[in-house]
Image: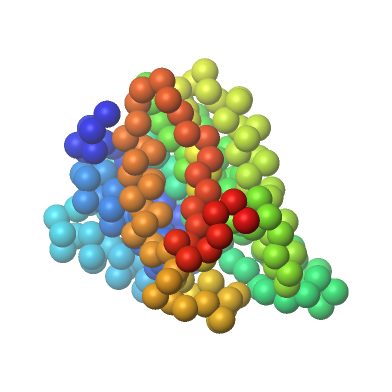
Amino acid sequence: MSQNAIADKVAIVTGAGRGIGRAIAISLAGQGVKVSLAARTQSELDDTHARIQSAGGQASVHPTDMSVEDSVNRLVKDSADQWGRLDIVVNNAGIGVFQALEQTAIDTWNQIQEVNARGTFLLCREAISYLRQQQLSFIINIASVVAVKGYGNQAAYTASKHAMLGMSKSLAKEVQEDGIRVHVINPGGVATDMVQQARPDLNLEELIQPQDIADIVLFLVTRSGNAVIDEVNVRRATSLPWA
């Protein structure tokens, strides 16, 4: 399947107001995909929407709280009603608070799990019936390198990304026969506000760029052959391989 083959398909991208989500949404729209943009902040969504429209793409704006079931359900229904189908879901929305476990309040822990893990579950669950209607469709879950290795002062965030990875592995087995492919991308340090908060010691010029992750998403959703990539671990060029 060439990149042109995804023209006129429909995608939902969460966390589309900035960073990785914005890069993914703009890249998909650049290939003719109709993109439903989801995030909490209206102004950021409007900015992404304007960028897509100025480049000749098609998108719609859906302010969404991924921790609220009704909000997620409305996102999927409104998107399907507007575009008439659903082919690609990108779960990218995420939050993180970076502190020692013993200093982490239960409300902080719960909020991170509700957005990162529960929100991904809610969107996948609601989208499956629409994705199943296509011959081939995709769920792309943006987890993190912390899903495969632990870091200090990131226990709550790490737990949420472990949950996302584990859920994705189970879901992939459940929906394979329906023609739905589930992929997980585990980025290392990406030049986003969240990474700068967690690792202010990192040189921004050496970080993975949001567009790098968007390029991987484009690669995954344009594969239609017998080779399926379940999980992609992405590291900074300056970090040690397999460390």
Question: Going by the image, does 97 lie left or right of 38?
Answer: right
Corner quadrant of residue 63: bottom left
Q: Is residue 243 above or below residue 171?
A: below
Hey, which residue is sitting farthest bottom in the picture? 200
Residue 7 location, x and y as percent?
Answer: 22, 38
**Residue at image coords 45%, 47%:** 90
**Residue at image coords 16%, 63%:** 54
Q: Quadrant of the N terminus?
A: top left
Residue 195 location, x and y as percent?
Answer: 53, 72
Q: Nearer the viewer, residue 87 or 239?
A: 239
Any part of residue 169 in sight = yes
**Residue at image coords 56%, 81%:** 201
Hey, which residue is sitting farthest right in the picture? 102
**Residue at image coords 63%, 47%:** 164
Any part of residue 127 in sight = no
Q: Is residue 96 above or below residue 80?
A: below
Corner quadrant of residue 49: bottom left
Q: Nearer the viewer, residue 223 or 136?
A: 223
Question: Going by the image, does 72 lie left or right of 151?
Answer: left
| Tally of marks | 0
Question: Going by the image, does 170 lie left or right of 21?
Answer: right
Residue 152 location, x and y as percent?
Answer: 73, 69
Q: Quadrant of the C terminus?
A: bottom right
Corner quadrant of residue 61: bottom left
* Colouring: rainbow
Q: Nearer the viewer, residue 64 or 109?
A: 109
